[in-house]
Image (cartoon, grey):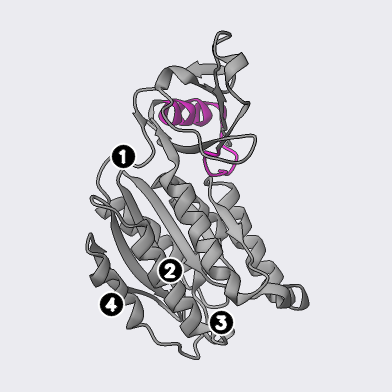
């Protein structure tokens, strides 16, 4: 069963002549499930409708600039054609953000490892504000929690800088699921939960989970998925890399995040900056 939320931004007629058009971006899809009998479907529908879902979204004007100072009255949420009540609205910059940073250490992404590591360090320093928290995972043959949840940016960057590249296969889905479960368990209630993944997505070693499991746990734990693929222009030359990028695009599309493929390694800085800006400008509807 797949449900979608439609979010509209309302402009009062008196406001319209003075304000530019706005664009609202939000995605919240429940995971696809195997067919069930009608009674089970009814029970499932009840469970899904009764669950309070946190929907992160960004509002921007025609020039792409973030729109701030909106209230709950400015939005309408529809699910299956029915208007839903907005219980809470977290304003940009006021909702705590819980970030899990996943860093690929496998053999396929070693060429610019140090540069990517330094760019990720600068991202943490830029995005972390009082009340936010970050944890660090490495993606290798097994998921590895490098730094447990911390609100201290220096501790997080120290953990990140302790990571060394290894020539190991990639348990990509296992690590994504472990990170989503970790955020679900450790993040403060009402916080924005975000996975930021630096990887080519080339899954070849997960023992427990597949793409469907990763999608389920990301959505179940209300996690946004952002990915940065350092493969760049080489991506189109490798079928395994194309498949891996497809995995990450699927996860980002179904959670409201984004999947980036910088053309050059030097573009990483700009991509991290874009993610930071977007996170700092998001509303959180509940």
In this view, 71 is above or below 239: above
In the picture, measured across the screen, residue 219 lies left or right of residue 111, that is: left
- x 60%, y 39%: residue: 35
Q: Residue furthest top?
A: 14
Report the residue marked by disc 3. Answer: 109
Mark 4 crowdedness (10 Å alpha carbons): few <14, some 14-19, many ≥20: few
In this view, 59 is above or below 239: above
Report the residue marked by disc 4. Answer: 158
Q: Residue furthest front?
A: 18
Q: Mark 1 or mark 2, which is nearer the start of the sequence?
A: 1
Tell me, yes or no, if residue 202 can be seen here. Answer: no
- In the image shown, does 217 or 151 lie closer to the viewer? 151
In the picture, measured across the screen, residue 220 lies left or right of residue 190, that is: right
Q: Any mark on residue 94, and which?
A: 1
- In the image shown, does 221 or 93 lie closer to the viewer? 93
Report the residue marked by disc 2. Answer: 102
Picture quadrant where residue 102 is located: bottom left
- x 44%, y 32%: residue: 68
Badge 4 vs badge 1, beta-carbon distance below 8 Å: no
Q: Nearer the viewer, mark 4 or mark 3?
A: 4
Marks 4 and 1, how far apart at CA = 26 Å
Q: Nearer the viewer, mark 2 or mark 1?
A: 1
In this view, 197 is above or below 165: above
Secondary structure at numbered mark 3: helix
Secondary structure at numbered mark 1: loop
- In the image shown, does 150 or 124 lie closer to the viewer? 124
Q: Nearer the viewer, mark 3 or mark 1?
A: 1
Give the residues in magenta.
26-49
In the picture, measured across the screen, residue 243 lies left or right of residue 272, that is: right
Residue 126 x %, y % = 37, 60
Q: Mark 1 or mark 4, which is nearer the start of the sequence?
A: 1
Mark 1 crowdedness (10 Å alpha carbons): few <14, some 14-19, many ≥20: some
């Amino acid at each position: 069963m797949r449900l979608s939320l439609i979010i509209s931004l309302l402009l009062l007629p008196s406001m319209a002549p003075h304000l530019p058009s706005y664009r609202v971006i939000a995605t919240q899809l429940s995971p696809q499930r195997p067919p069930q009998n009608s009674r089970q479907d009814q029970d499932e529908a009840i469970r899904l409708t009764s669950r309070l879902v946190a929907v992160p979204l960004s509002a921007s004007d025609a020039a792409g600039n973030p729109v701030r100072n909106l209230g709950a009255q400015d939005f309408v949420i529809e699910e299956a054609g029915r208007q839903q009540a907005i219980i809470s609205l977290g304003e940009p910059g006021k909702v705590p953000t819980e970030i899990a940073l996943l860093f690929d250490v496998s053999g396929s992404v070693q060429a610019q490892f140090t540069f990517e590591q330094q760019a990720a360090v600068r991202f943490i320093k830029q995005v972390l504000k009082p009340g936010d928290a970050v944890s660090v995972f490495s993606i290798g043959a097994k998921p590895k929690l490098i730094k447990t949840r911390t609100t201290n940016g220096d501790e997080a960057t120290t953990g990140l800088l302790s990571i060394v590249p290894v020539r190991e296969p990639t348990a990509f889905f296992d690590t994504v699921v472990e990170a989503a479960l970790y955020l679900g368990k450790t993040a403060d209630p009402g916080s924005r939960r975000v996975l930021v993944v630096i990887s080519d997505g080339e899954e070849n070693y997960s023992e427990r989970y597949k793409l469907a499991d990763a999608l389920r746990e990301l959505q179940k734990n209300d996690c946004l998925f952002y990915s940065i693929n350092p493969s760049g222009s080489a991506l189109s030359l490798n079928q395994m890399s194309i498949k891996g990028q497809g995995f990450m695009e699927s996860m980002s599309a179904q959670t409201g995040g984004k999947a980036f493929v910088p053309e050059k390694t030097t573009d990483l800085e700009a991509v991290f900056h874009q993610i930071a800006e977007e996170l700092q400008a998001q509303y959180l509807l509940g």
